[in-house]
Amino acid sequence: MRKQIAAANWKMNLSYQQAAGLLDELLAQQIELAPNQEVIFAVPFPYLAMAKEKVAGKTNYFVAAQNCSDKKSGAYTGETSVEQLQSIGIGHIVIGHSERREYYNESNAVLATKVDLCLAAGVTPIFCCGEPLPIREAETQNAFVQQQLEESLFHLTVEQVSKVVIAYEPIWAIGTGKTASTQQAQDMQQHLRKVLADKFGADVADGISILYGGSVKAANAVEIFASPDVDGGLVGGASLQAAEFTAIIQALK
Ligand code: PEP
């Protein structure tokens, strides 16, 4: 059974105190997760240790970094390596969010390196992909997102790719309040699973969790997550409110 995941992406929001308060409020709900369900909080770097402490002992609750360096170690002022994150117990890193691709020029090739560094350190990359609006309007989204997978993941072995979580996030739906329709999300995610099956085999593709991201909220999560190829969500805005994110967790299959 594939993992069903509710991942919160806090981006560059919240003070330390607000972040601690939000985690306290959420964790106080004592939401019981089924063995195949996971909740992941991708928090700003300075809050990683605090968040780790808060989820300690909670089964299937994890903390993720939102980014990592594409270098292993050394003279890269201001960067944080996968190994450093791993050394404080971080087991998941969001790789290639569209905001990183757009504002920090992260290419598919750089993201392939980051994925490699994660896997070498035993860290799960949550690999983001998705098309901008003009590509969707030109109806070439399938080829566009397929290329992102080909250029960042297709060099992996079967064993390695099985450890990757994919998040499909159509850029036109991120932070816009405009959600992809349930059918649009399912169609793309079915396509991506087929692309993975053609390259790595059906069994491998069947085991890879593919999350949907783009204006997921309490009101639409049940319907979106119900689709057969949608294995939960990567959630921005709605993850900053305890009641909203609680409902999203409860919407997991
Ligand atoms: C995101 O940050 O990955 C995201 C999907 O944001 P939002 O839920 O706000 O659209």
Image (cartoon, rainbow, N blue to C red):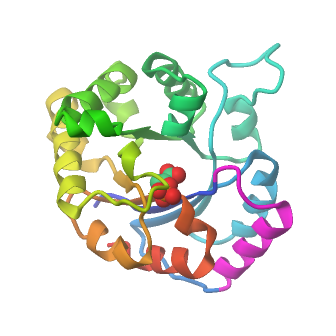
The percent position of residue 97, horizontal first and vertical second, equals 51, 39
Q: Nearer the viewer, residue 53 or 185?
A: 185
Residue drawn at (48%, 64%) of the image: 38
Residue drawn at (34%, 73%) of the image: 220
Q: Which quadrant is the C terminus positioned in?
A: bottom left
Is 126 left, or right, of 146 in this rendering? right
**Whether residue 93 is situated above or below residue 108 in the rendered picture:** below
The percent position of residue 12, horizontal first and vertical second, equals 70, 50
Q: Quadrant of residue 142?
A: top left
| Residue placed furthest toward the bottom | 29
Magenta stretch: give its range.
11-28
**Whether residue 126 is situated above or below residue 233 in the rendered picture:** above
The percent position of residue 228, horizontal first and vertical second, equals 19, 62
Q: Quadrant of residue 196?
A: top left
Q: Which quadrant is the N terminus positioned in?
A: bottom left
Is 204 left, or right, of 113 in this rendering? left
Please tell me whether residue 191 belongs to the stretch shown in magenta. no
